[in-house]
Image (cartoon, grey):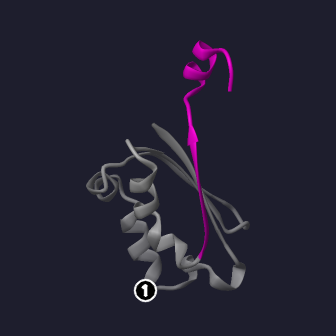
Amino acid sequence: MLYLVRHSHKTDNCPAENKDIAPMLLKHLSKQNAAQYGISLHGEAVINGEHTLYLILESDTAEKVKEFMKPFSQFGDVEIKSASPCEVVVERGRC
């Protein structure tokens, strides 16, 4: 199953500004590390200037995704939503 994950944090709590934490989080987001959680990382992007990260992840359970995202929960909100590829949505005839 696909999951769309949104992490956001306040400007004054931006982990990218912390020279100790930022490299650790970047390493955590690697495809190799995600695989250790049973997760495939399909994409990631940060909205410039908005302190918001989006991830497209594939996992057999939401619990694995929640566990994977724990380091980001320390800095702000983490929202996890189940998702589908567009092809699947069209095949089933509804969003």
x, y (%) of residue 77? 63, 69
- Residue 69 part of the magenta-drawn span: no
- Depth order, front residue of 76/22: 76
Q: Amino acid at mark 1?
A: Asp
The span picked out in magenta is 76-95
Residue located beneath label 1 in the image = 20
Q: 77 left or right of 30?
A: right
From this view, report whether residue 1 is shown above or below residue 21.
above
x, y (%) of residue 2? 49, 39
Residue at the spot x=30%, y=59% of the render? 33
x, y (%) of residue 17? 57, 82
Residue at the spot x=51%, y=71% of the render? 72
- Count the labels in the image: 1
Which corner quadrant holds the C terminus? top right
From this view, report whether residue 38 is shown above or below residue 87.
below
Residue at the spot x=69%, y=85% of the render? 12
- Depth order, front residue of 7/46: 7
Which corner quadrant holds the N terminus? top left
